[in-house]
Image (tube, helix red, strand yellow):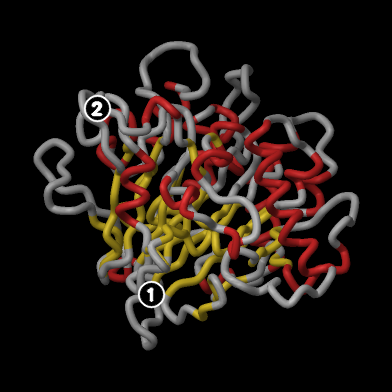
């Protein structure tokens, strides 16, 4: 089995899946619309069906190894209550199995969810996280079982989880263990949220404090370079990315290991202008945001998980953001929109297979007359610095 990444077509929402060569599954956000379940409409892709066919089963029960909720907006956790099992994994029943409820072996939880709750899906995610956290507080014997595992990402302003630092990963940390299994060729570098982002008063805190991370793939233990670097940032805005850039460069920590570089970049907030500047104010892009784009490796690709992007004033997706991304890429073919891949009349997940030469789309996936691929280990030291 190859390492792969899928970006699902869910309109303005995020739903991505990383599958490692050993079958380990890492789900990043979910947006399972009810209209998509058992859909026969070619315009509405059946995300749940594809997820079930992509992940493994244990005792006939479907499960993901890791679920990372970048933040609690509904378009990042829609369908959580209905499609993911919540509760003691020992009580998973035939009824749950018949409903194809997916067990989450290990949750990644940002305390910002607890502080900024705005919808029932987010509330359900928090309640399940708190159930697991309570097992650790009580030192319950089942606390480390699959279905009870949890990792706390970043800081919490109220310090409600201060005694659980052994479960915490903070910016600058490199995570190599997933669902209690050490990975030698895959890791995640945590970029955000930072403590400073907790105090944001002038911008929507939830977006500013999204979990931001870089997924890292190597092809062998002796590899000096990463074959693929994929950046995920939820709805992180230009303020958050400015902090990430500043902290990473000035700390010097892990810069030698390509902490800011990327082959695949999931456009924050569904190709919103907020990555570049204020939401409604079409001022010039912030230099820090443009600098983040300069860390693309040769052949870098931006993916917009959004509706079709047209030349209008909507945001997201923003046409101005799209053109700004393209201006900073090698070509317009390096900008992909989930709503129109491989074709607008039948969108399907944008999938990349991770190879020694970087992320490559399956041979059957074409854009124009060419298979789209990005740079990789062969271009690991080549950063496209435009402008």
Residue 196, percent from left and from top: 81, 49
Q: Residue at x 54, y 71 (%)?
A: 179
Closer to the camera, 379 or 174?
174
The residue that label 2 is drawn on is: 40
Upstream in the sequence, badge 2 or badge 1?
2
In the image as oriented, which residue stretches furthest toward the front? 94
Q: Is residue 118 above or below residue 354?
A: above
In the image as oriented, which residue stretches furthest toward the left? 369
Closer to the camera, 131 or 234?
131
Q: Quadrant of residue 285?
A: top right
Q: Residue at x 25, y 70 (%)?
A: 1
Residue 268, percent from left and from top: 53, 38
Q: Residue at x 56, y 76 (%)?
A: 180
> Spatial distance from mark 2 to mark 1, Cα to Cα?
38 Å
Q: Residues within 10 Å of mark 2 (few under 14, many from 20)?
A: few
Is residue 62 shown left or right of residue 136? left
Picture quarter with the C terminus: top left
Residue 118, percent from left and from top: 72, 30
Question: Element at badge 1?
Answer: loop
Q: Residue at x 27, y 60 (%)?
A: 353
Question: Element at badge 2?
Answer: loop
The residue that label 1 is drawn on is: 218
């Amino acid at each position: 089995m190859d390492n792969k990444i899928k970006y699902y077509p869910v309109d303005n929402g995020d739903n991505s899946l990383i599958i490692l060569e050993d079958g380990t599954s890492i789900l990043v956000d979910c947006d399972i619309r009810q209209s998509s379940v058992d859909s026969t409409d070619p315009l509405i892709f059946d995300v749940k069906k594809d997820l079930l066919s992509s992940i493994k089963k244990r005792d006939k029960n479907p499960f993901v190894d890791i679920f990372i909720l970048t933040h609690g907006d509904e378009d990042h956790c829609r369908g959580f209550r209905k499609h993911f099992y919540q509760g003691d994994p020992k009580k998973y029943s035939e009824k749950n199995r018949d409903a194809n409820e997916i067990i989450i072996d290990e949750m990644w939880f940002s305390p910002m969810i607890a502080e900024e709750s705005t919808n029932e899906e987010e509330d359900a995610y928090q309640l399940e996280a708190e159930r697991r956290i309570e097992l650790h507080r009580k030192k319950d014997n089942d606390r480390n079982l699959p279905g009870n595992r949890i990792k706390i990402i970043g800081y919490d302003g109220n310090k409600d989880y201060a005694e659980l630092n052994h479960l915490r990963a903070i910016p600058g940390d490199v995570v190599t263990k997933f669902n209690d299994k050490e990975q030698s060729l895959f890791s995640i570098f945590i970029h955000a949220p930072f403590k400073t982002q907790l105090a944001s008063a002038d911008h929507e805190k939830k977006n500013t404090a999204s979990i931001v991370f870089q997924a890292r793939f190597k092809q062998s233990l002796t590899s000096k370079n990463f074959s693929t670097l994929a950046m995920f940032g939820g709805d992180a805005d230009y303020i958050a990315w400015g902090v990430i850039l500043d902290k990473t460069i000035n700390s010097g920590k892990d810069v030698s290991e390509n902490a800011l570089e990327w082959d695949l970049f999931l456009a924050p907030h569904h190709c919103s202008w907020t990555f570049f500047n204020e939401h409604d104010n079409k001022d010039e892009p912030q230099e820090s945001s443009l600098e983040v784009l300069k860390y693309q490796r040769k052949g870098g690709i931006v993916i917009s998980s959004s509706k079709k992007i047209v030349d209008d004033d909507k945001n997201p997706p923003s046409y101005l953001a799209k053109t700004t991304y393209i201006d900073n890429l090698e070509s317009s073919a390096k900008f992909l929109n989930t709503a129109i891949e491989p074709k607008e009349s039948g969108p399907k997940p944008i999938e990349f297979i991770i190879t020694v030469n970087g992320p490559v789309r399956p041979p059957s996936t074409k854009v124009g007359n060419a298979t789209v691929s990005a740079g990789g280990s062969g271009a690991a030291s080549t950063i496209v610095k435009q402008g």
